[in-house]
Image: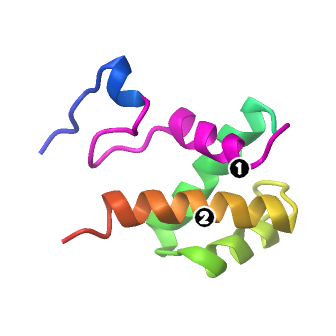
Amino acid sequence: MEPQSYSSGERVFGPPRGTFDADWAATALRSNVPGLDFATSVRVMEYAWELVQSRDLRGATLADALSDSTAVSVDSDLARSAAAVATEIAEFYLDRD
């Protein structure tokens, strides 16, 4: 099944099922981490999503992997926040039966 496109109104609530929108995820991350710049938030969420898909990580194990990564430079608080957002997206879009 091909991913569905979405209208600007739908983007407020999230990307359509089966897709990952790094800009949307980064916006969710920035709502939890005030002052985080856009470019960093996108980079962190793209890498978090890569870990979700390639290593099937969620929650604390995802936060640990982000903190330990050399691919992105994040402190433990940002790693936990990014992991929470990525885990929520994964539970909603990937983990449903």
81 lies left or right of 91: right
Identify the residue at the far top of this view. 8
39 lies left or right of 6: right
Reply above or below: 44 against 94.
above
Reply above or below: 89 against 27.
below
Q: Is residue 23 magenta?
A: yes
- The Cα atoms of the two marked residues, 2 and 1, are separated by 10 Å
Q: In the image, which residues are magenta?
A: 12-35
SS under mark 1: helix
Residue in the picture at 79% in, 58% down: 78
Identify the residue at the far left of this view. 1
Reply above or below: 43 against 97.
above
The quadrant in which residue 93 appears is bottom left
Query: Marks 1 and 2: in contact by CB < 8 Å?
Result: yes
Mark 2 or 1, nearer chain start: 1
> Residue 11's spot in the image, x, y percent?
40, 29
The quadrant in which residue 84 appears is bottom right
Q: Residue 32 has which mark? A: 1
Q: Is residue 66 magenta?
A: no
> Residue 14's spot in the image, x, y percent?
40, 39
The quadrant in which residue 80 appears is bottom right
Residue to which mark 2 is pinned = 84
Residue in the picture at 51% in, 66% down: 87
Tell which of 45 and 34 is nearer to you.
34
Answer yes or no: is residue 70 visible. no
In the image, what residue type sits under mark 1? Answer: Asn
